[in-house]
Amino acid sequence: MSDEFEIATQNLETLRLSIAEEITKLGKSERVNELLACSFGRVIVNEFKRGELSADDYGAYLVLRLEHIADWIEAAVANDEPWLKNVDELGRPKKLLKFANAMQIVREANRDMMLFAQKSRNVVLSQDDEELVKQFDNGYSLVRLLTPRALDRESGQMQHCIGQGAYDQHLEGGEYEYLSLRDPAGKPHVTMEIGVNRRTGARDLKQFQGKQNQPPISKYQDILIPYLREAKVTIRDASPSLPYVTDDHGTWHSVYDLPEELEIKSLRFIDYAVYEEGAEPDGTKPIRLPKRLIGTHSLSINGACLSGEIESHPDDMNISLNNVHFTERQTFLKTTGDIHFTSTTFVTPPELIEAKNFIVHATMPESWPKMIVASALLDSYGGSLPNFPMNVRCGHFKANLGFEPNDQVHDIEVSGSLVIITTPDFQAAPRGVKTNNLVIYAKNEPNLEHVMPDFPEVSGIIDVKGFDGCAFPENLPDSTRIIFGGEITLGEYRNNQQRMQQLPFN
């Protein structure tokens, strides 16, 4: 079979490679990486195989908690937890094999974290465990946590995972600082992790957590923001916990009041609550997009409403939008990079979407742009396409669903392969589709006898998998090859139609 037909399954391999890359980026030990692969990695791949999760969707949701899961496993290894020794025949801890999805792993990590917090709440500290960094005028103070015992006590009182040994190794070397905001009675309210570049001294805010990893209330944000600005700390990811970004010049900007021109390498906003609770974006506080982005290689918004329109940006900027709603019309979204949409909606769709790869997952918009151009791949996963745009040009088109009949659609040109992974309720592809190769993979073996799409042109190969029988279009050229356990030209099929229809589709 031609390599082109690997499009239908390549996302699974891409997903595996992506998971391995994300695990490696955490910088954990080989043992922790192995345990992450057989827990987080295993369930993500299985969810994807079951059609419950897309390769790109996992990155916007579950990978946000990968570090949390890794901290839990690293703490278990550091403490030599007994459950690590109860393994199957392949040496995998049975506790990690019981999970069906990633959120179950997160809940287990949270449960163990809470148990540890209960034990560590009353840890007694010495003067060597913490040091005062700043005394604020209102009686609050900021202290630096210096020892594993200090991290354990902070974890116990704040009920998050900074203790248990997961962060102990970061206390040496000067590349990380752990700070805690204390009230006049000495009770902690915010824990911060700051990365320090030992060569340049640059400081980057990596975590800004309240109790139980919840966003700190505005009162505590207001205390700490002046200190962080004065200390020239930059922000990696904006979130409701701290809704600010720092541009390439170190200037702070509220995401709710971004300037018309913003010079920033990566503009990223993450609302963790959207993923954890399935909440809708907060429509009362839309993020106002700048008119001009300068030097930006990626725009990634996860869980928000957006207002304004970006009128200019670098030609190769990648755009990733998850659980996002545009409150104002976008004239166009155009880039030579990639565009990824998951559950993204528009008040009025843009006239043009153009990208190298355009990936659309989960809920589909009720209406589409007048034209879509994807030079490499248009990939649609989960949902239906009842109002698909009338004008599409793409290299390859992968639809992990069946098309609903739509006479409005009459101008889709696929220069490579159209791949449809379908279900028993598959109806028919829309009329007017021109493609070089057609690939249809059936789930649950429906019968395609009466629903074979009537394509005006399939110039290369038709590859059909998992169907009981098939009636091919009459207007295909005799040179078209049909694959079902072997390659046969359409002319040979027509000459032996009765015999060919009785052959099984492998």
Image (cartoon, rainbow, N blue to C red):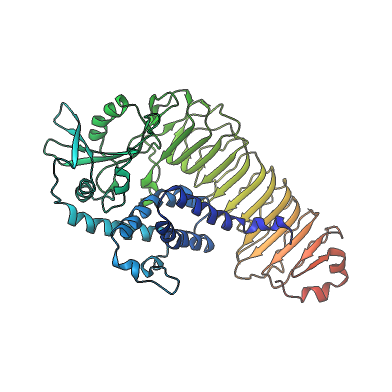
Q: Nearer the viewer, residue 84 or 169?
A: 169
Residue 149: percent from left, percent from top: 20, 48
Q: In this picture, is 137 found above or below 456? A: above
Find residue 305 and report its image quarter. top left
Outermost left residue: 185
Residue 206: percent from left, percent from top: 36, 39
**Is residue 436 among what the camera can see?**
yes
Q: In this picture, is 264 found above or below 366? A: above
The answer to whether 30 appears left or right of 12 in the picture is left
Please tell me which residue is depicted at 36% across the width and 67% down the height of the picture. 95
Find residue 239 and report its image quarter. top left
Q: Nearer the viewer, residue 99 or 32?
A: 32
Residue 113: percent from left, percent from top: 27, 56
Q: Nearer the viewer, residue 245 or 201?
A: 201
**Is residue 278 among what the camera can see?**
no
Please tell me which residue is depicted at 68% across the width and 61% down the height of the picture. 440
The answer to whether 486 appears left or right of 118 in the picture is right
Residue 490: percent from left, percent from top: 84, 64
Which quarter of the rendered picture does the C terminus lie within? Answer: bottom right
Which quarter of the rendered picture does the N terminus lie within? Answer: bottom right
Q: In this picture, is 390 found above or below 15? A: above
Please tell me which residue is depicted at 74% across the width and 70% down the height of the picture. 485
Labels in figure, total: 0
